[in-house]
Image (tube, helix red, strand yellow):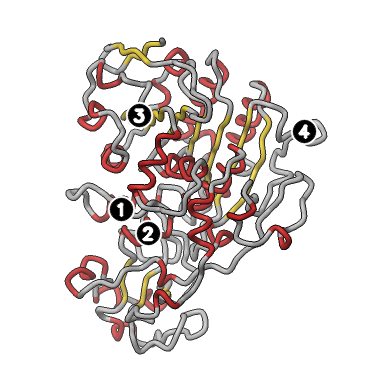
Amino acid sequence: KATMQDNDGCRSEISTTPAEAGNPRMIEFFSGIGGMRCAVENAMSSGNDTSMQQCRQRRRQLRSCVAFEISLHANATYTLNFEDVSSESKTGSKTARGYGQRGGFSVYTKLIEQLRPQDLNGSADIWTLSPPCQPFTNTRLALRRDGADKRCNGLRAVMDLLSKVDDKPRWILLENVKGFVGSEMLSLWYETLETNGFSWEEYLLSPTQVGVPNSRTRYYMIAERSERFRKNGKCSRGDHIITRVPMSKCSACNLTSKDNAAPKDEHDVEHEQETTPRTLAHFIQHFGSDEAAPYLLPNKALMSDWAKDLPIVTCRDRMTHCFTAAYGRIAHRATGSLLLEDENHPGPISEHPPDRSNMIQYEGKLRRFSPEELLSLFGFPEGFHFPENMSLQHRYKLIGNSVSVFVVTRVAARLLNSCGCGQSKWLQIDSDESISNYPCC
């Protein structure tokens, strides 16, 4: 066993029992609300039920999962939805026991920089990480300070831990924004992986490529401590980024038949043929007037000069803008789309642009997507929810900072050489018959 010391000087034992066959142990760095864990569990699954009950049954396939995150709101949400997380973590206790029980499932409010190599030795087969994206974001006001940004300290700490731990993980899965490509930090990450015996593949993928009506292009890297991903003695360093979704190991689970699969590229990776995104009606809920009130755009906003530029969609559309952490505060195409619920609108905005001459006409009809609808668009299991006392803005922020579980499931399945068909089967059926009773349709 290894020991771990918290900020108060307390020490606790960490289980380092080897993983059972087929039951990997996992560490989530920058865990957020648990999107990476959901995706890894999906990648190991073989069912087509996406409810929280079914996901809890799948969790038996993970021997352990230890998560590290500094956001108290994120950790409260994580522990609420992952019921196998230790009760000490749920109370936020900083006793020795509260940081212990590491052979099971725990989430800790702790900076990665505070971890020591002996804390992690022998504790995981797979590391997942989605480091802070602000140093690499391409938004209008972003400073893009790259390695000079203090928010990169956590990623530097992961590199240091990976180099110093005796028992290194077999697999690593990393997600970040597209601007991470070409950064100083990614160059350092390449060197760390190379030095420690890993090979890797790089991807730039969006949920639209797996049938989800949301544009959210992100950088993904999967790495294994072997020569598996090395081609001609080399791995991609931004020069061979794959832009097509890797095909599932199980041909019956792919969105297209094996006969229609795209040809292999230079990486010898079979890819799914891209599919048309589903309509938003599959993801939205019909609210009564009182239920919709918290999400409605106020008249003051509709009367402003910038209202005519608002990013509007209807339930018949098949695309939304990327939803970010600022979605609950700022109405703009850079933070995410708004939903127009108007029975008289003839069809999707993409084909029938709305009249923008007088935006006040949409009073009571134009709203933000609810957090539950966004969770569905991001691929979180049915029943995933937030603490009742959490503010709406905090819920939006947590979702905007999370990952697309749909996409991560596909790259995790490629990494683990598994099926991951739980969600792809769900996306296979794109009939509009089941949603024809939606009032906005």
Dot 4 alpha-carbon crowd within 10 angstroms: few under 14, some 14 to 19, many 20 or more:
few
From the image, tell me which residue sits under label 3.
105
The disc, 1 or 3, on the residue closer to the chain's N-terminal end is 3
The disc, 4 or 2, on the residue closer to the chain's N-terminal end is 4
Between 12 and 263, the residue placed more toward the observer is: 263
- In percent of width and height, residue 351 lies at 52, 84
Query: Mark 1 touching mark 3, by CB under 8 A?
Result: no
Quarter in which the C terminus is drawn:
bottom left
Dot 3 alpha-carbon crowd within 10 angstroms: few under 14, some 14 to 19, many 20 or more:
many
From the image, tell me which residue sits under label 1.
383
The disc, 1 or 4, on the residue closer to the chain's N-terminal end is 4
- Residue sitting at the far right: 232
From the image, tell me which residue sits under label 2.
374
Q: Quadrant of residue 118?
A: top left
Residue type, mark 3 in image: Phe
Q: Name the element at disc 2.
A: helix
The disc, 1 or 2, on the residue closer to the chain's N-terminal end is 2
Residue type, mark 4 in image: Lys
Q: Establish if 437 lies above or below 35.
A: below
- Residue at position x 41%, y 30% in the image: 65
Q: Name the element at disc 1.
A: loop
Q: Is residue 402 left or right of residue 278?
A: left
Q: Is residue 383 left or right of residue 176?
A: left
Between 23 and 349, the residue placed more toward the observer is: 23
